[in-house]
Amino acid sequence: MKKAKFFTPALWVTVAVTALSAAVYGAARLFTPFAEWWAKYPSQWVRAFLAAVTNIIPFSVAEMILLLLLPAIIIYILVTNRFIRGEDKENYYRCLRPLLMIVLLLASSFLGVFGPCYFRKGLDENLGLTKAPVTAEELAYTAERLIEEIEKLDVNIYKDGSTFTDKSYGETIDDVKAAFKKYCGENQYISYFNSNPKLISLSPVMTYTHISGLYSFFTGEANINFNYPDFVFPFTVAHEMAHQRGIAREDEANFVAFLVCTGSDDSYVRYSGYMNVLEYVLSALSKADAERYKVLVKNTLTDEIKGELRAFNTFFEKYTDSPASTVVGAINDSYLSSQGQTAGSASYGLVVDLAVAYYKQK
């Protein structure tokens, strides 16, 4: 009887690709110039290719995979169970090889494509900003500048205080895409390619995880939670598109989203950029100097902005203490820490440092 062999040529090729991807990832962690070059060119080509492939499909492929994952695992266990108990190793290997290859290819797509982007040059260096520890006075100054910009905009207000846009999600996405194309044309560190951000069908459920968007590195898709209030949506689209274009760090993706949105021709997209960063700045100010924060809220914050913040807090009340957010938050925190973002989930808020540096140099 012919002895069953586990390794096939296809599996060997997959192992080799994974090993090469791991080597690329290791080099990126050690050498910033290499990480920058890899993120701008080879990684960019792969991310653009994945986006082009999944653009053809109108729904989120990543969401579909996640929804089918549990049934697929159950079916796999049931099918392979009888092979495990039997003596026919070749049949067992035939079931095990595809699973191992899928896992290795998923690892390769992170290690060789998106993972190295965490170790490229800092956004402050690419933008020529001087990032430094910020003071409460600087936070207040930045908040005042953001409020001034918001006051210049013409946005609609609901009677309950929450702003809205009368455009569809698709129209808003097109506005953000146009703004992104314009921004990429003016900045060499980031390149534009066409992509269609996908709406998550289970967005109301996803909100319990406190996730407003997700970049799927293995499908190349920017996935958007549409359940959040309108002013969050454009900023989230731009944030996930920034990840899609190799801006891996969360604070930097937030700041790119800010720059993209505030450069838009659409007033509501601009409002989204200013308002989302203002939230981060106000939060930082309240922790740095509670008294200065109270004075700013009383004397400078407009009734419209106060209404928006109150409406958001009201919306978020039922999602605040969800067990799902605790679990997902812990996983996300560990993941970000493993990629050199030592602040973990708090790294999203480090966009404040970039915003302060930006307004100090304006």
Image (spheres, rainbow, N blue to C red):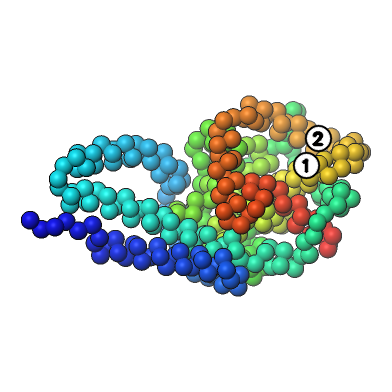
Rendered location of residue 236, percent (x, y): 62, 47
Please tell me how crowded label 1 is: few (under 14), some (14-19), or many (20+) other residues with Cα within 10 Å.
Answer: some
Residue that numbered label 1 is attached to: 283
**Does residue 192 appear in this view?**
no
Q: Quadrant of the N terminus?
A: bottom left
- Say what amino acid the circle numbered 1 marks: Ser
Q: Are marks 1 and 2 in contact (CB under 8 Å)?
A: no
Determine the CA span between mark 1 and mark 2: 14 Å
Q: Is residue 120 left or right of residue 58?
A: right
Residue at point 70%, 33% (across, down): 312
Q: Is residue 124 left or right of residue 90?
A: right
Q: Quadrant of residue 59?
A: top left
Q: Which mark is residue 306?
A: 2
| 102 or 189: nearer the viewer | 102
Q: Is residue 153 left or right of residue 191?
A: right
- Say what amino acid the circle numbered 2 marks: Lys
Please tell me how crowded label 2 is: few (under 14), some (14-19), or many (20+) other residues with Cα within 10 Å.
Answer: some
Residue at point 70%, 28% (across, down): 314
Rendered location of residue 16, percent (x, y): 36, 66
Relative vertical location of residue 241 with respect to residue 85 in this rendering, above or below: below
Rendered location of residue 203, percent (x, y): 54, 36
Q: Considering the numbered disc 1 on the image, is that residue within a helix, a strand or a loop?
A: helix
Rendered location of residue 295, percent (x, y): 91, 38
Q: Earlier in the sequence, mark 1 or mark 2?
A: 1
Relative vertical location of residue 42 with respect to residue 269 in this rendering, above or below: below
Q: Nearer the viewer, mark 1 or mark 2?
A: 1
| 320 or 275: nearer the viewer | 320
Residue at point 40%, 65% (across, down): 19
Q: Considering the numbered disc 2 on the image, is that residue within a helix, a strand or a loop?
A: helix
Q: Quadrant of the C terminus?
A: bottom right
Q: Quadrant of residue 188?
A: bottom right
